[in-house]
Image: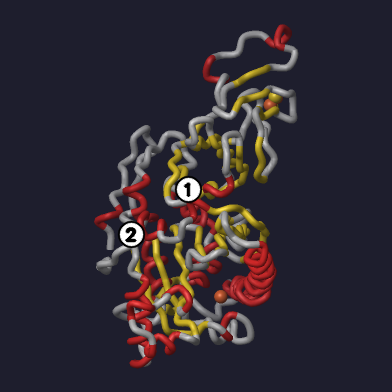
Amino acid sequence: MIPETRPNDWDEIVARLLVHLDAGTTDSADGVHAVDVSDYLDADRWAREMDRIFRHSPVVVALTAHLPEPGSYRSIDLAGIPVLSVRQADGSVRAFINACRHRGAQIVAHGTGKARRFTCPYHAWSYDGSGALLGVAGRPTFGDIADNHQQLTELPCAERSGFVFAVLDPAVSFDVDEWLAGYGPILDALGLDDVELLDERELIGPNWKVAYDGYVDGYHLDILHKDTLGKDVMGNIMTCDAWGPHQRVAFARRNLHELRDIPREEWQPGGHMGLVHTVFPHVSVAGNGGTGMMVSQLIPGPTPDRSRTIQTHVVTRNATEEERAATAQRADFLEWVVNEEDYKTGLGIQAALASGANTEFLFGRNEPGNQRFHQWVDRLLAEPFATSLAPPRRNLAAAD
Ligand code: FES
Ligand SMILES: [Fe+2]
């Protein structure tokens, strides 16, 4: 069941956390859920995950903050597909496969920037921001160029709630509101459509699902992170809400009990909980819409046992110098925590997966976010999709 939730329900979340604090409980699933260890290891399964979930479902190719003005672009590689997103003159965003129509060289190096035209490094064919071929070096010597070579291959793309979504198969259509299943207004509470980029780092981690498991897990916070995050946040007290495959989890901060002495109409819930909003299948946002937030984008591969994570730190436009400095300092701290605590542990799990010690992993009743994540991965893998021009759209509002 999707809980009835309204977009500005943060008071209700801390109220639920207070009930859990008093009762020694946490949001729970119905029972313990087992996941086969082979789900994290098997190369065939990984290839199906890449194909069905990453190449045939909407993924996040950029944040609105990466593309602040016309001509702004972001170039990344996702599930083996190089993607170029560009802000257009009319303010919309278009996404293309970053492959030259001459002989396929990647036109734009990975990263963000601003450009009026993109020139291929191989033979200098050039394109404008709408993907149209502008110029061909040595044009009179080349010969005819058919119409279908005059435009970069475009991907279906939509911008919503501070994220640019695309499907990495040009033949697949999608409706972003169906994909978000009502989650858009929940994400809007973070204000990610009106923030600035402050800093970006890249980390190497284990299999994308081993890494993802950590983002929705409140069970480990005061154990693995006892000397870091656990000083501020309690473990094993969380709320977990879902809209289709997307989840919002909240963790109790150690000052939560103070709310007992404050009238509810004066609560400032963001100061008493840690919030993580995930965007299935590969993004999580840590922060509560305050001055600084971290968006983690998981990029699977290049092999089943590895992933990369791009940590993007954003600040509100009106953030003061002190707030920017604090966010930059937090960026160092979070890079260290994720590298040295989460991913060191995750890479250790990855190394031991094939040992035969476990044939399955257990997710407890107190790990509802993990259970839901794995069930959604299984569900999308089991769902038939057509590779024809019009595969069935998924209506995720009816999920759960
Ligand atoms: S491959 Fe791009 S100009 Fe030749
Ligand atoms: Fe963690």
- Image quarter of residue 391: top left
- Residue 74 visible, this angle: yes
Q: Position of residue 99 (x, y in %)?
A: 62, 32
Dot 1 corresponds to which residue?
A: 51
Q: Position of residue 151 (x, y in %)?
A: 55, 23
Q: Is residue 120 left or right of residue 71?
A: right
Q: Nearer the viewer, residue 122 or 37?
A: 122
Q: Nearer the viewer, residue 148 or 256?
A: 256
The mark nearer the N terminus, 1 or 2, is: 1
Q: Secondary structure at mark 1?
A: helix
Q: Nearer the viewer, mark 1 or mark 2?
A: 2
Q: Position of residue 56 (x, y in %)?
A: 43, 45
Whether residue 83 is situated above or below residue 189 in the rendered picture: above
Q: Quadrant of the N terminus?
A: bottom left
Dot 2 corresponds to which residue?
A: 244
Amino acid on which disc 1 is placed:
Asp
Q: Is residue 25 left or right of residue 339?
A: left
Q: Secondary structure at mark 2?
A: loop
Q: Position of residue 189 (x, y in %)?
A: 41, 60
- Residue 307 visible, this angle: no
Q: CA distance from mark 1 to mark 2?
A: 20 Å
Q: Residue at x 53, y 81 (%)?
A: 221
Q: How is the image coloured?
A: secondary structure
User: Circle 1: is it few (<14), some (14-19), or many (20+) Cα within 10 Å?
Assistant: some
